[in-house]
Image (tube, helix red, strand yellow):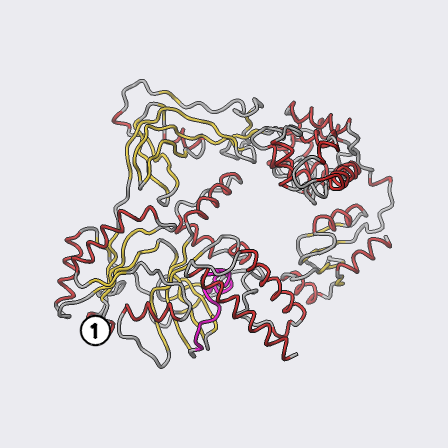
Amino acid sequence: MQDVKTVIENLSDEIRQHEYRYYVLDDPMISDAEYDQLMQKLTKLEDENPQFRSSDSPTQRVGGKSLEGFSSVRHRNPLLSLDNAFSYADLVEFDKRINKIVDQPHYMAEFKIDGLSVALIYQNGVLHQAATRGDGVSGEDVTLNVKTIRSIPLKLKQAYSRVEVRGEIYMPKKEFLRLNIERDEQEEKPFANPRNAAAGSIRQLDSKVTAQRSLSAFIYDLLYMEGETVESQEETLSFLLEQGLPVNQQAKYCENIEEVFDFCMRVQEQRHELPYDIDGVVVKLDDISVRSDLGQTAKSPRWAIAYKFPAEEKETILRGVELNVSRTGLIAPTAILDSVNLAGSTVSRASLHNFDLIAEKDIRIGDVVLVHKAGDIIPEVLGPVIEKRKGNEQTIMVPEICPACGSHAVRSEDEVAYRCENINCPARLKESLVFFASRDAMDIEGMGPAVIDQLVEQGLVQNVADLYVLDEQKLATMERMGVKSAENLMQAIEASKTRSLGRLITALGIRHIGAKSARLLTQYLFTIDDFYQATVESLLQINDIGPRMAESLVYFFAEPRNRETIARLKEAGLNTMEEKQEDRALPLQGKTFVLTGTLETLGRNEAAEKIEALGGKVSGSVSKKTSYAVVGSEPGSKYDKAVQLGINILNEKDLLELLRES
């Protein structure tokens, strides 16, 4: 066993080194595929020998159990904020104050990263705790979330008994853009800037969400090191880097305040080319030994200052509005502008977000508008310059039809967005097909995104119903397909015809209707024709069906193009009926199940479907009325509560056996 432990330790060290080179130095030694192979090997070894899995293992970055809240952490010394400088004169005044105490002061000028300040504590070289700055005196314990950030080492190069550092967690511009597009499509409010996005990601109670956000960090201060001291800020940055911590190496040692200002001007011009957002330059007295002589105010140290860059906004003319349809059917307005140079690039298009905002700000075509870049990244219209109106500006009309397919544009009462409900709209067809074929929907094995891309691009599928009239010979000629794969795919498509009505309703991708809601609905609506006849009022009589879900269903089945697609699916032989519960034996009637953790064979949705098909109820919470808790790998707090209440515990094998016997 000792040999296995040594292998795990050596493999962990190797992976840490690769992470350091990739995430900190941006100088990888191996490919992503090779890195993945090392991680898979380590994961397998640790799963087989869990006694050798350490808290600082590279495998421990995926996030763990959800928290109910963050505990408070009191900082050893207050984490102070900085006074601001906005001009050369402000920097000169700062320098004069320093010169009263220090003769010929030298400075370190560092990028002011626009993120979330965090303090990290390492004990015996291992990351022990991470806390937000909070009010400077106390912050929140965000250790689990910070552990998911791959640029932050879980283990330092040297095992000092206690090291405390401070840094900034940030979201790269590319990730910020991706996340906001995703939030727009899900009708969630976009983050205003990368700093808000980083803060929102770190303050997730579920660390698995944080792990998906691709955050990074720069460490810039040594708060405490037991038994050791450093003499200068330049030495501090070198020490941090030597320990494997991510340090922004753009910092510059400056002989005087004139050099500092020159550096600030160069950075201000180049900042838009950086992959992360900065809002200024932090200027620090390099000599740490004399900082205490300068002291501090209640909020800020007197030995440092932040030179802040001015916000950049420009005026231009709004020439028109273009409507674009997202992969989820969202119809979004985009401003067409006279070109203007803004934040380092030429801008001729900008986001208008939604039509409520357009009306609220009274933005009109022909207006002189004020434009900026949210987080120096996403161009958006702030509003019109009313005093420059000439009287011939035109009101921006809300859409009545989808610009991509001509279907009716629909807006729910409680939403700001207009949407296309046509499942086959060209703008959303690929997304519709991927979801339709997914495991929780029609479960068409082999029908993945790569195959769907080819089917759509070659014109073989223009409607989800086209899947059921595909030609096997044409499939076989597709890239990386072949005769056998085409035959298997056709068999999977044929098998999907027998799926339940609940699966079909799920597969149609109706907004707000997931697998559980679809199964619930088919307990009251037994044929696809029943869905056509349903009204908002009748749907609201069903427990757990709310106004938004009811309205979405009615809109979907009222769209003629969707009705045409469903008719074709019915003609192709898909199951569009559900057996009435009173006509079948229900061996699990009256039994309540709670599912927690990952079920490898069935998956949570399929397990729930099978339980409910036999009359059982699947609940989201454990109580004394729970009959069984079905526990997969990495179960959450539901498992702990089930044990505490003495609930019957089933593993996946037990559940499968129970379902077979029933």
Task: Give the dominant element type of the magenta stretch: helix, strand or loop.
Answer: loop
Q: Between 260 and 457, which is closer to the camera in this rendering?
A: 457
Farthest residue to the top: give it. 392
Query: Which residue sits at x=70%, y=60%?
Result: 632
Judge left or right: residue 567 versus residue 479.
right
Q: Position of residue 19 (x, y in %)?
A: 48, 62
* Numbered range of the magenta stretch: 141-159
Residue type indicated by callout 1: Val
Q: Between 38 and 323, which is closer to the camera in this rendering?
A: 38
Q: Position of residue 406 (x, y in %)?
A: 56, 22
Q: Between 202 and 59, which is closer to the camera in this rendering?
A: 59
The answer to if 303 sits in the magenta stretch is no
From this view, report whether residue 402 is shown above or below residue 594.
above
Label 1 Cα crowd, 10 Å radius (few <14 / some 14-19 / many 20+): some
Farthest residue to the bottom: give it. 227
Query: Which residue sits at x=42%, y=51%?
Result: 172
Q: Quadrant of residue 480?
A: top right
Q: Position of residue 297 (x, y in %)?
A: 23, 65
The answer to if 142 sits in the magenta stretch is yes
Please, what secondary structure does the residue beneath circle 1 have?
Answer: helix
Judge left or right: residue 382 versus residue 443.
left
| Tag 1 residue | 290
The image quadrant where one finds the N terminus is bottom right
From this view, report whether residue 561 is shown above or below residue 140.
above
Judge left or right: residue 408 versus residue 531.
left
